Image (cartoon, grey):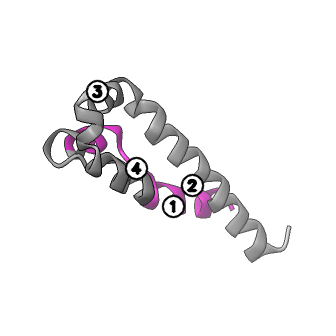
Amino acid sequence: MQNVFFTQYVQSRKSIGFAYLLWVIFGLHYAYVNRWAIQFVFWITAGGLGVWWLIDLFRMPGIVRKYNDELALQCLGNIKMAHRL
């Protein structure tokens, strides 16, 4: 069961490095973690005229960690449902 969880999680988890890359090049870091509503607001406000964009420099690890934590819980829930634990 641990192998199933690990495989499922590793295939879907997000990388902080790739999130930074998307943040710098395209400003797509919220889309990367499936937060599309915030992504559109980010684009419309031009990243809070740069202020929000700069703040996200420091928030990025937490943004990705939160996504990965939620993903781990979802993977665990899927495994429990599949094995009816």
Question: Which percent across, then down, holds residue 15?
Answer: 35, 44
Amino acid type, callout 2 = Leu
Query: What whole-number distance in Å separates the C-alpha atoms at marks 2 and 1?
Result: 12 Å
Label 1: which residue?
7
Amino acid type, callout 1 = Thr
Amino acid type, callout 3 = Val
Task: Determine whether label 1 and label 3 are within 8 Å by CB.
Answer: no
Q: Which one is earlier in the sequence, the residue at label 2 or at label 4?
A: 4
Q: In terms of secondary structure, where does tag 2 sit?
A: helix
Label 3: which residue?
51
Label 2: which residue?
71
**Residue 79 in view:** yes
Query: What whole-number distance in Å separates the C-alpha atoms at marks 2 and 4?
Result: 9 Å
Q: Which of marks 2 and 1 is in front?
A: 2
Q: In terms of secondary structure, where does tag 3 sit?
A: helix
Q: What stretch is highlighted in magenta?
A: 1-21
What's the mark number on residue 14? 4
Q: Which one is earlier in the sequence, the residue at label 4 or at label 1?
A: 1
Q: Quadrant of residue 55?
A: top left
Q: Residue at x 54, y 41 (%)?
A: 66
Q: Is residue 7 left or right of residue 84?
A: left
Task: Determine whether label 2 and label 4 are within 8 Å by CB.
Answer: yes
Question: Which percent across, then down, holds residue 30?
Answer: 37, 49
> Is the residue marked by circle 2 packed among few (<14), some (14-19), or many (20+) residues within 10 Å?
some
Question: Which percent across, then down, holds residue 73?
Answer: 67, 53
Q: Nearer the viewer, mark 2 or mark 3?
A: 3
> Is the residue marked by circle 3 packed among few (<14), some (14-19), or many (20+) residues within 10 Å?
few
Q: Which of marks 1 and 3 is in front?
A: 3
Foreground residue, 47 or 26?
Answer: 47
Q: Which residue is drawn at 60% across and 50% down?
A: 70
- The answer to if 63 sits in the magenta stretch is no
